[in-house]
Amino acid sequence: MMNLLLTFGEHPGWFFVVATLLPLLSFVLILLASALWCAGRAYRNTPGGAALFNLCGGEERGRTAAFVATGAIALAFVFSLVGCIRFSAQQHGFETAIKQHGKALHQIAAKIKETSGEAKEQLEAKARTEEEKLEDQEKRWADARKTNWQGHFDWLRISPKGIVDADSGTVLQLGFKIDSLSAIMFVMVTFIATLIHLFSIGYMSDELQPEVEDHQVHTAHGHLHRRGRFGRFFMYLSLFCFSMLNLVLADNLFQVFLSWELVGVCSYLLIGFYNERQSASNAANKAFITNRIGDAGFILGMLILWTHVGTFNMEELFQRVRAPLNDTHGAVEGVAGRIVRGNLDANNTTKAGQRFTIANDGSDVLLFPHRPSAHYHAIVPRVSDNPKPDQHGSMPYWMLVAAGLGIFLGCVGKSAQFPLQVWLPDAMEGPTPVSALIHAATMVAAGVYLVGRCYPLLTYDALLVIAYTGGITLFVAATIAVVMTDIKKVLAYSTVSQLGYMMLSLGVGGWVAGLFHLVTHAFFKALLFLGSGSVIHGCHHEQEMTKMGGLFPKMKITALTMLAGVLAICGIPLFTGWYSKDAILAQAFGFIYVHPQHLLLFLLPLATAGITAFYMSRMWLMTFTGKPRDEHVFDRAHESPWPMTVPLIVLGVCSVGIAWGWPVWDAEASFLEANVHHAQYPAILADFGHIDYSISEHHGEYWIAAKDEAQNERVFAYRNHHLAGNIAFVLVAIGIVFAGAIYWKRVLDPAEAKEQFPRLHAFLMDKWRFDRLYSVIFVRPCLTVGHWFAAFDLRAIDGVIHAVARSAMWVSKWDGLFDHYIIDGAVNLVGNTIYGMGARLRSVQTGFLRSYVLFLVLAAAGIFLALAYFVRMAMAG
Amino acid sequence: MTFAVGLNHFLLLGAFLFVCGAVCMATKRNAIGILMGVELVLNAATINFVAYAHYNPIFQVEGQVFALFVIVLAAAEAAIALAIVLNFYNNHTTVDVDTAEELKG
């Protein structure tokens, strides 16, 4: 026990490893207990069997499983929180020291300019000591991160043919690496997952009954009756949480990929939880298959990187692709932190390698040594053909673009971006807590997280693709959400839209803003989904908003907490969404300021901010205000029990205050954002330093700022946060007022709008016809080709088989005839002959004594005659 | 010329008797008749033995001995056969052998 505590003391990164493994443990426990339970059930009347049966949960198995899973994830939350606090404390200590030294250095540098002579020399000496201290602190912080917050072990070793050696071959590793982003993600995921587990205990209570009636499945004997699956639900939730945590924990792409697939499987299992429903089964398949398309891209991207760089470890990949920051030996000047493009000169080859000329539009990318060699001084490096980790290498530029886009394709699938967004709305078929988990904390967050994680591998071209993908997604999804009437569908499209915001932000260099929005969005989206779950539960599984209305007095807690979520997603000041969404808009604004040709990347999110406000207000107003649209639903509606309302209240509080900093009204002062900012890669500053709105005196980036020349633009980008925020706020206000006029005050009639633009309405109701488009482009051609193959199978292959069968039958028939007539005939002939002879001889046996005597005499006479004949012959002879 | 009686005559007599006995056995339906036929056949054989004993010095003793055997056998046979016939009569109230057809194939 002491040893364990000491291990945690020395390697606090293990807090996160334990937090990851806890849900896995719960999954395995529930799985084993179910197996033992099934085995024990047959013997529960014997003493030993009864003990086993009760140990594995007894009759209350499902409830026990729920407690185990909830306990595990709650404990994981505690571990994550402790780990996160420890990490933040350590980071804060080092960063403060570094900041102080940097500030001092900055001030000294300013003084040096003003003074001269001896004082200048003194100042310069002081500056040198400050610089040494700064470097010392930086080195110590780097060492601490390496020893305390990282770890890995070899998992699989694939040796070359014929060589069995511990050190040779390729190695797949399992490992963990914690930075402030993953620490925050851990806390966020475990916290939300814990609340969702708690909520599920209430929401899924129907499944506790030994027999559940599914009203949506019709069989020949009425509704389907099946066993309750409470325990199974929590088992899947545990596996889901483990997968997601492992994904966040991973320090290499392979481990990410493993978790990636596990997440996919879990989503499949949970979306298809009511697998007897055709729609749920279809939705699960759709989600899984759509994700496969993305994963194919992910694998290709991974393989390209593996081929050219030779490692899956993300940190090593980044070190090789990006120029070193401050290494005097290996650095190529002026490009610190960037991807270095150039050309390989095939004519200038020496033993050391090929000559590499740096050019901004070159066809190759320089790969940097993993461990810079001391012998190497280069502005123009030589590149070897098969680079070892300590040598320069190169890879084609388009390959790096393809690798980045491949990884992004995986994220497109997981995060439901255009054009693979179609699965997410269908995923609403799963139980509502699952929707909340998928939409807030796990699956869709994985895509955005991975783009953020792999950021240094993405080239400018790939980032532009990401930005436009996000832009298109956010607009398309928001417009569809406007016309949806299913409360969960509205939320699903709003998720797609918000994920589009995050992708766009990452694409335009807003790494911090995008991931900040990921975290804040997780809270309010979980809240909104759980709120909708509470509404659906309260309305007895009615999801259509056209049958709701006026529910506010009946479910006040749900309504108020959901209102907090709606205001947060709209971006009303002081709610979480305001901090993160405005940061994204500011980032996009800064981007189009530098690149005016991409104006669309600002206009789309800006317009969508208004649309978002409209449809979210519409959802809330339609559900909770006005007159009830359906008396039947209204009369039976009720507030949900406490396991469901408590998570709502907690998440409601988080949706308001999770992003607060000091002062609260300053959009730049968010404490959470500052924490995310710590994890930012240097590569982002190298690529987008001039438009990173978050570089400001608040974050004290003096020393980087001093090195950057494009400070004016940055200051502009910083100031434009408020400008972009204000414009967005006006649009949001218009959206809310519009929604209020239509759905609250009922001044305008939405039916009229529907009648005036019937084709637009139908187009939006049809989800921009994406499903139909895919049906025409992919599904139907697939089916057609499938039918061809089926026909080929039926005609050609079955034909051959049938012909073979028929000829075999023909041969058998002749063989049968031969057997019957020739062989059996011969046997029968012998028998019949003997039988016939017997039958004929039978008449001789007359039974008359006299005839026997006659035969006797005749025989004797015959014998005598024969004897006489032979004697005569003998005598004559 | 004197008519010398030789071996052949005895053999002819034996043969004649044998044929008579056989025909008697084959045609008679009366069990007693059949027994009489049997006696004829046995006597035909005895005549042959005695004839050979007389005319062929090699069989002088054996012929006589066999003739005696046949006579003894005939006596024994007659005793047994008469017993059978008596039983047959008890069962069938007749001595017609054609009624004894249980052995018919």
Image (cartoon, helix red, strand yellow):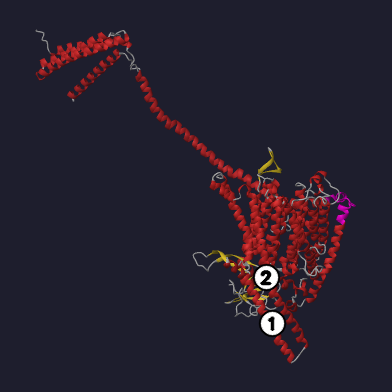
Residue A11 higher or lower than B6, as above or below: below
Residue A642 highlighted magenta (yes or no): no
Q: Residue furthest bottom?
A: A118
The amino acid type, in three-letter code, at marker 2 is Ser
Q: Residue A217 location, x and y as percent?
A: 70, 43
Q: Quadrant of the N terminus of chain A?
A: bottom right
* SS class, disc 2: loop
Q: At 71% from the left edge and 76% from the top edge, which residue is drawn? A: A96
**Which of the two marks, 2 or 1, is nearer to us in this view?**
1
**Camera-nearest residue between A440 and B19:** A440
Q: Nearer the viewer, residue A437 or B52?
A: A437
Q: Is residue A785 visible?
A: yes
Q: Nearer the viewer, residue A453 or B52?
A: A453
Kindly check if marks 2 and 1 are in contact, taking CB atoms under 8 A apart as contact.
no
Q: Residues in magenta?
A: A738-759
Q: A413 or A186: which is nearer to us?
A: A186
Image quadrant in which the C terminus of chain A is located: top left
Q: Where residue A750 sits in the image (x, y, percent)?
A: 86, 51
Horizontally, residue A413 falls left or right of residue A628, namely left
| Distance (Cα) linking label 2 and label 1 | 38 Å
| Element on which disc 1 rests | helix
Is disc 1 on the same chain as disc 2? yes
Q: Along the horizontal axis of the image, is A320 left or right of A163? A: right
Residue occupied by mark 2: A363
Which subunit holds the residue at mark 1? A
Task: Identify the image quadrant of residue A683.
Answer: bottom right
Residue A39 horizontal side relative to residue A179, left or right: left
- The quarter holding residue A613 reads bottom right
Instruction: Name the residue tied to disc 1.
Output: A131
Image x and y of residue A616, in percent = 81, 56
Residue A531 x %, y % = 76, 54
Q: Residues within 10 Å of mark 2 (few under 14, many from 20)?
A: some
